[in-house]
Image: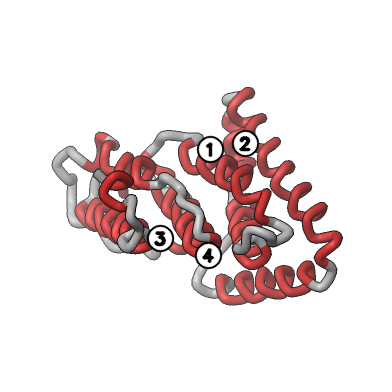
Amino acid sequence: AKFVNQANIGSIHFMQECIVEILGVHPDALYKHVFIFIREAALLVRNALTAKSKDAYQKVYSWQTICSLNLLEMLVSRYGSDSKAVLQPLIYPLVQVLTLTATLVPSSRYLPLRFHVLKAMLKLSKNTGTFIPVSPIILDALNFSELVKKPSGPGSYSNLAGLLKVPKPTLKTIAFQEQCVAQVILLLAEHCNQWSNHIAFPELFL
């Protein structure tokens, strides 16, 4: 999808679910397809890291790429959750792609996009039982200068689910800063909750 909003997000999720079911019908071909998808996403990110151009970044930071990454998360979560599952070996490369995507452009304007990717990583971690060190990426969202400076005005609350990027004037509003802090708290709480019963929990989060 070129654009995602409240009107079409349900349809996009439905189509993603359909693709997950269809690809699961032929498990022998499933690994090959998902491997190719992840490789294509990795090449996009690598090209952006190499070229460091606006066009290269835009190819990664687009709804097409984010929706594709969400689909890959759904596929690997569904068919890679067991140690003997066909997609289990693809968890690590997918995590690498997601991590690089989340941190590709360290700009507060792309915080909504970072939150989208982090949610996909948390889902992947929960569904596959794989620890993914996302807490540094989550907490890094609070280090942007716009979030520590005095707000310029109240602003208005936005639906972050339909955003990848926010305008510069929005960054300094109270509403956006409160939304970002709330998202960080929710994501960090979800991450901690996933591993709260694990014996290594104190070492993982202290």
* Residue annotated with mark 1: 100
* Residue occupying image coordinates x 17% and y 46%: 151
Could you tell which of marks 4 and 2 lies nearer the N-terminus? Answer: 2
SS type, badge 3: helix
Q: Nearer the viewer, residue 104 or 200?
A: 200
Choose top left, top right, bottom left or bottom right for residue 24.
bottom right
* Residue annotated with mark 2: 45
* Residue annotated with mark 4: 127
Gap in Å between the C-alphas at discs 4 and 1? 21 Å
Q: Specify whether 154 is left or right of 124.
A: left
Q: Could you classify mark 2 by the number of other residues whose Cα lies within 10 Å: few (under 14), some (14-19), or many (20 or more)?
A: many
Residue 141 locus on image (x, y percent)? 32, 43
Q: Nearer the viewer, residue 110 or 77?
A: 77
Instruction: Name the residue type under label 3.
Output: Leu
Q: Are marks 2 and 1 in contact (CB under 8 Å)?
A: yes
Task: From the image, state whether disc 4 or disc 2 is nearer to you.
Answer: 4
Q: Is residue 67 visible?
A: no
* Residue occupying image coordinates x 45% and y 57%: 122
Q: Residue furthest left?
A: 150
Q: Residue furthest front?
A: 199
Could you tell which of marks 4 and 3 lies nearer the N-terminus? Answer: 4
Could you tell which of marks 2 and 1 lies nearer the N-terminus? Answer: 2
Instruction: Name the residue type under label 2.
Output: Val
Q: Are marks 2 and 3 in contact (CB under 8 Å)?
A: no
Q: Nearer the viewer, residue 62 or 132?
A: 132
* Residue occupying image coordinates x 53% and y 38%: 100
Gap in Å between the C-alphas at discs 2 and 3? 23 Å
